[in-house]
Image (cartoon, rainbow, N blue to C red):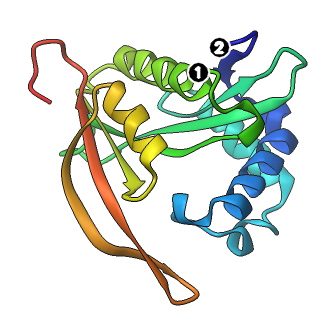
Amino acid sequence: MNGESIRILTADDAAAYQALRLRGLQESPAAFGSTYQSEVDIPLPWIAERLARGAGREDVMFGAFDDGGALVGLAGLGRQTGLKTRHRAHVWGMYVAPEARGRGVGRALMQALIAHARTLDGVERLTLVVESGNQAARALYHAAGFVTYGVEPQAYKLDGDYWDSELMSLALAADASS
């Protein structure tokens, strides 16, 4: 990474987060379960409140900032809340702006997110879903230690186009199997 810094976003980052999130939804619609149309009208105070709640550790959004302070990357972590599922957390909303790609920003975001997940009491496993054709993202996740455990055919459909989702998992304990 060339001068970028990684940290958990706060309510003060709401406008930058929303702008980058909407950009990602427009530029890479196959990479997200949501759409630009469903998020464009979300009020900024709602986003700020969600980021403020997330700073409570178990439902967080990491941001990568370039050396000029601009937000260039995102990666979310959400802990499952059910009694039987609290041992898992899910990676969501991963996006790196095209101008920041190829500099290790995605790797740094994943390293920070995984390190954070390891500090959460009782979290044993991370899961994520990636569009099967997104070779760069798949390679990033595999390099971080995630393993594929399934593919959901036609998981998403937009304007008559379908995308398959690759389901991936990472055991956080050093002695656990992937």
Residue closest to the eye, 59 or 102: 102
Residue at x-position 39% and y-position 14%: 119
**Residue 171 drawn above or below residue 94:** above
Residue 17 location (% of width, % of height): 77, 42
In x, y percent, where is residue 57?
52, 25
Q: Are marks 1 and 2 in contact (CB under 8 Å)?
A: yes
Which residue is depicted at the point 73% across and 75% down?
Answer: 37
Residue at (86% x, 28% y) in the render: 70
- Residue, disc 1: 104
| Quadrant of the frame with the N terminus | top right
Give me the residue at 85% from left, 31% from top: 12
Give, as a three-letter code, the residue at label 2: Met
Which of the two residues, 22 or 30, is positioned nearer the viewer here?
A: 30
Of the residues shown, which amino acid type is indicated by label 1?
Gly
Viewed as shown, does residue 172 lie left or right of 163? left
Give me the disc on residue 83. Answer: none
Q: Where is 19 relative to 26, above or below?
A: above
